[in-house]
Image: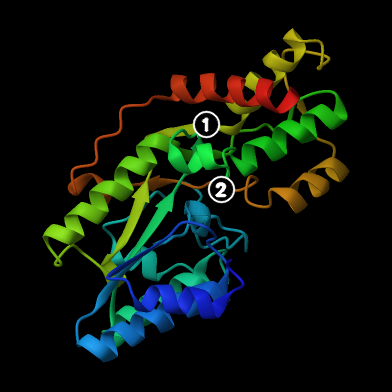
Amino acid sequence: MLDDADLLQRLSSEADIALHTAHADHMPAARAILAGLKATYDRTGDPSAVIHTSGTGVLCNVENDESIDPETVYHDTSVEQMASLPASRRHRDVDFQIISADKDGYVRSYIVLPGLIYGLPTGPIADLGIQNIKSVPIVTNIRFALARGQAATIGDGQVVWPAVEVHELGDFYQILFDSYSANADVPHGVEGYYFVENGEFVMVDVAREVAVTLHGIGKGRSPEPEQLSPEEMRQLQKRSPLFAFDCRARGERSRALGWRPKKTKGDMLKAIRVETLSTVA
């Protein structure tokens, strides 16, 4: 469906709000949605809303720019910090397209940037089988561990990332949708970035949970993760290219709308165990 630009444009032209959660980097789909919303504006004179899903991967210093403090924590309330992110970063090309439409005045844009999403979703869309019900980065790492017979880390595994449970992410979309519906002055455009995270984790903790789980069912050599060889690191980074880089975010603007996540790091590690067993099965 994402490749059916005519369909996306037509459906968007009939909508007051376009909620895009299918793909953060599909430029043709983003352009088709915006074209449809532009048609709505041309017809009515009223801007529609576009809620677009990006990701905190935009914060990863993939350029290894030494001028950037490795301890930097990004805040979604800081317009300056968000503007400083290079155009070459993952997701930025589509993000810029969305924000450009906001600047042109025919949409109000809201860009949602979740951390690592964990947990198995439930609900009618999942039941219909039209939703991805597994975390792609987590499953990629689990499958890599299964293939080599042992969970492992890149280096010492001290890379830090934010995380969010899938249902609590859904809660945020509902809150953002309702807030816009009730008040079109919800921050948008260059002020409309929303980090969705509830705390941080260290990659070695995830690798250890996978290692313990695989070892417990006879699929791993040890309950302690190993370090990947340089060649293995290159292989894994082709599949999960951002997990060698710190990604630190604070969702202050998200919480200002009333979002109150409750899940903890402990909940995440339990979910990793469930995801591991589900992947093996």
Residue 103's place in the image compared with 269, above or below, is below
Q: Position of residue 144 (x, y in %)?
A: 79, 35
Q: Position of residue 178 (x, y in %)?
A: 20, 53
Closer to us: 132 or 189? 132
Q: Mark 1 is on which residue type?
A: Leu
- Secondary structure under the numbered disc 1 in the rendered image: loop
Residue 234 makes an appearance in the image: yes
Residue at 63 percent of width and 43 percent of height: 136
Residue 170's place in the image compared with 111, above or below, is above
Q: Position of residue 209 (x, y in %)?
A: 63, 19
Residue indicated by mark 2 = 130
Q: Is residue 221 left or right of residue 164?
A: right
Category of crowding for the residue at label 2, using alpha-carbon neighbours closer than 10 angstroms: few (below 14), some (14–19), many (at least 20): few
Residue 150's place in the image compared with 124, above or below, is above
Comparing labels 1 and 2, the label whose residue is closer to the camera: 2
Q: Quadrant of residue 243?
A: top right
C-alpha separation, residue under disc 1 versus residue under disc 2: 14 Å
Residue indicated by mark 1 = 120
Closer to us: 34 or 142? 34
Closer to us: 230 or 39? 39
Q: Mark 2 is on which residue type?
A: Ile
Q: Quadrant of residue 109?
A: bottom left
